[in-house]
Image (cartoon, helix red, strand yellow):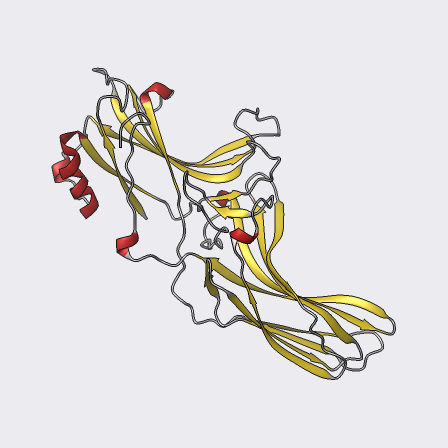
Amino acid sequence: MQSFSFVHLREGLLSPVGPNQAVFVMLSCTFRYGRQDMDVMGVAFRRDLFVVTRQVYPELQDKDKLTHTKIQQKLLRKLGDNAFPFFFEFPDNLPCSVALQPGPSDVGKKCAVEFEVKAFCGETQDEKINKQSSVHLTIRKIQYSPEDSKVIPTAETTFEFLMSEKPLHVKLSMPKETFYHGEPVRVNAEINNSSSRNIKDISVSVEQVTNVVLYSNDKYVKSVAKEETSDSAPSGTTLKKEYTLYPLLAHNKDRRGLALDGRLKHEDTNLASSSIVKQEVLKEVQGMLVSYKVVLRMIASGTVGSSEVSLELPFKLMNPKPEPANQKTWCLRSLNEPT
């Protein structure tokens, strides 16, 4: 996976480049936990998951001999000789941008996987970066939904109860495995109650499960959509019904610990997409892993008491792959440079 960009050298963009200095660009992927102004003694934590640096000026290779994208060619014509294109290649094992939503009282706290591109001046790429000689840009890495696998998700199980000769059979199914953000999630429930218990208080929910795998084994399970019903299945009856759920960030504002797709400045975001990790990739390198499941819960009541029974069905919640015309490019600019 490649990302392309430009450094545009203009007066005021970076401090003057000395005779022994060069301009470098750096792509970094960082996992962060806690506030930046707190120390690392068990409270704040930061780890670079990936860092790569390239020199863009003086040029190591004639840019006229490089292969440019159509967008780069247009920008070269527009920005002139002081524009220097470059590209980075994202390794397959890098995580996507994701962040845990802080609560209203968690001022300044952050748990996130973030990507940043930074341009800076220096004699070498390893020297300490001077803020006066650098400019940075936060970017977001997202994973698009793979092609429809045609898999029809299904889960079913049988419950047996004390003093009941026959069991309770429950089945859950969904029309497809992957749903897009903003799309209604439809679930079909089938309850065949041959037991002596009466089934009541049926509810269906979509739950987001976030595992923070880098620094601990923290696990956050949050219901992001739920329908509580008065549906029932008395002993000896069958219930078949379709439920529709809407897992949207708009319905879950300010909920602490909810995983979101990485947020860019001035842009809204959505619930975090399902993590898809290749088998050969270490999960610990991913920082945070996100998954979704539908949970059907009900109360089985009888003469000897009541108990809750449930059935889960995992699915994926992701972004659709955009059309080529909708894809964006980005450019590093100084904070004090006019746009």
| Residue 1 vs residue 299, the one in the foreground | 299
Locate the C terminus and report the quarter of the image it occupies: top left
Q: Residue at x 60, y 38 (%)?
A: 104
Count of picture labels: 0
Q: Find the residue positioned furthest to the bottom.
A: 236
Residue at the extreme top = 19
Q: In the depicted view, which residue is nearer to us: 194 or 201?
A: 201
Q: Position of residue 55 (x, y in %)?
A: 26, 29
Residue positioned most to the right: 304
Residue 130 as seen in the image, left or right of residue 237: left
Q: Is residue 277 above or below residue 168?
A: above
In the rendered structure, the answer to whether residue 194 lies left or right of residue 61 reads: right
Residue 69 appears in the figure: no
The spot of residue 304 in percent (x, y) is 87, 71
On screen, 125 above or below 209? above
Left or right: 31 in relation to 236: left
The percent coordinates of residue 179 (x first, y second) are 47, 63
Can you tell which quarter of the image residue 86 is in?
Answer: top left
Seen from the viewer's position, the closer of residues 294 and 336 is 336
Residue at 18% from the left image edge and 47% from the top image edge? 70
Answer whether residue 19 is visible to the viewer in this image: yes
Q: Position of residue 155 (x, y in %)?
A: 59, 71
Q: Is residue 73 above or below residue 275?
A: above
Classify residue 2 as left or right of residue 224.
left
